[in-house]
Amino acid sequence: MLVFEAKLQGTKQQYEKLDEAIRTARFVRNSCIKYWIDNKRIGKYELSAYCAVLAKEYPWARKLNSQARQASAERAWSSIARFYDNCKKSQPGKKGFPKFKKHQTHGSVEYKNTGWKLSEDRRYITFTDGFEAGCFKLWGTRDLHFYQLKQIKRVRVVRRADGYYAQFCLDVERVERREPTGKNIGLDVGLTNFYTDSDGRTVENPRHLRESEKALRRLSKKLSRTAKGSKNRAKARNCWSRKHLKVSRQRQDFAVKLARCVIQSHDLVAYEDLQVRNMVKNRRLAKSISDAAWTNFRQWLEYFGKVFGVVTVAVPPHYTSADCSHCGKPVKKSLSQRTHRCPDCGFILDRDWNAAINILEKALRTVGHTGTLALSLVEGNASGDIDLCLGEETPLSKPSHRKRKPKK
């Protein structure tokens, strides 16, 4: 599934119509969640049928396309199903009980096969539901001429601080070709450097949020001085939101480009299976960890691993920083100690470099028995990803099955 995005260019009246559609979609989702709270035993199909009841009860909700109403009900059910899954898995902490969506500067409405129409040159889109938003020009770098209309499964209209966007969900399998390099790499992410690999190379942490904190603080003060409900407050809030949107886009762009570069340059990539949700509970490091966006970087690593046929391995982070990569003996360190010094073998190395070597070694131990499979994936460029979440105990060799001599 590919997602292409283009900005919508229209008039102020057309944008107001899109706002009405987004508010209606949010109303349908919140009503479905309220219906589920009152009737806990209902399922996905009951929520879809409840959309027709809402259309009869509220005439203005009938303006929204019927499939768009069903898509809003599906969103409500996805949050409910996620809550059920977390309860079954006995996930510690909050289980993610479904919440009502409030009025925010962002929102979206999703259409399926009806309610929209593309022009012949694929540069204009017209929304044909009851709100009659009209025709919009598409601004973007992606060309939809290479795909058929039946491949477009959904069209999502997204409102952000800097305008309105149309996202086209295409039913296309993406497979890229690459030449095998014969190189394996282990990555140890951090806050001083974004990551340190097993070859000793480091990538500087960009710290996008830290670099923009001064401007965000100034815009926040300007917002707090405006009167509630005034036009100046709406303008100040929009400027503040645009700055946050720019920071998130910078972080996303950095993660995508770096992950693609790492995947294209190696045949096996090993990284830590970090529980970032638990790590951000540290009040002193929460902002820095969130600014680094390790989870986003890992998701793009796994995605490009599937696209380019590169093996990606998630290794548990236990003792990767403590164990000596030369002799294997554990060496206790504090967070402030950045150099690994082994008292047994006298090995001295940077702390993160030592951890990256241990990460790669753990990955190779597990992929050792599937080495022929990994090699075939690399040579054939198969579209598959072996994402191995290793346990604490990893067998180094197969158990011997010797025949015992019969007892006399």
Image (cartoon, rainbow, N blue to C red):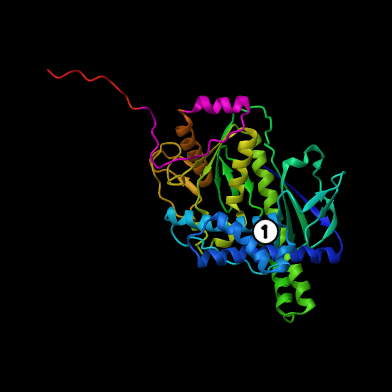
Q: Position of residue 203 (x, y in %)?
A: 63, 46
Which of the 4 image quarters holds residue 228? bottom right
Direction front: furthest residue:
56
**Which residue is found at the position 80% from the left and 54% from the top?**
7
Instruction: Count up the numbered dots.
Output: 1
Q: Quadrant of the N terminus?
A: top right
Placement of 400 over or under 155, stated as above or below:
above
Q: Residue furthest left?
A: 408
Magenta stretch: includes residue 335: no
Name the quarter where the C terminus is drawn. top left
Q: Nearer the viewer, residue 148 or 346?
A: 148
- Please state which of residues 32 and 226 is positioned toward the viewer in this rendering: 32
Which residue is rendered at x = 58% and y = 34% of the image? 384
- Residue indicated by mark 1: 69
Residue 214 in view (yes/no): yes
Q: Which residues are magenta?
A: 370-398
> Looking at the image, is 16 positioned above or below residue 315?
below
Numbered disc 1: secondary structure: helix
For the residue pair 322 and 89, the one nearer the viewer reads as 89
From the viewer's side, name the closer residue of 192 and 400: 400
Q: Estimate how packed mark 1 is, as few (under 14), some (14 to 19) or many (20 or more) residues with alpha carbons within 10 Å.
A: many
Q: Position of 252 compared to 32: left or right?
A: right
Is 374 left, or right, of 143 in this rendering? left
Is residue 242 visible in this depiction of the protein? Answer: no
Residue 146 horizontal/vertical position (percent):
80, 37
Question: In the rendered structure, which amino acid carries the disc numbered 1?
Answer: Arg
Query: Percent position (x, y) of residue 340?
Result: 47, 46
**Residue in view at x 60 percent, y 57 percent:** 48
Percent position of residue 127, x then y: 80, 56
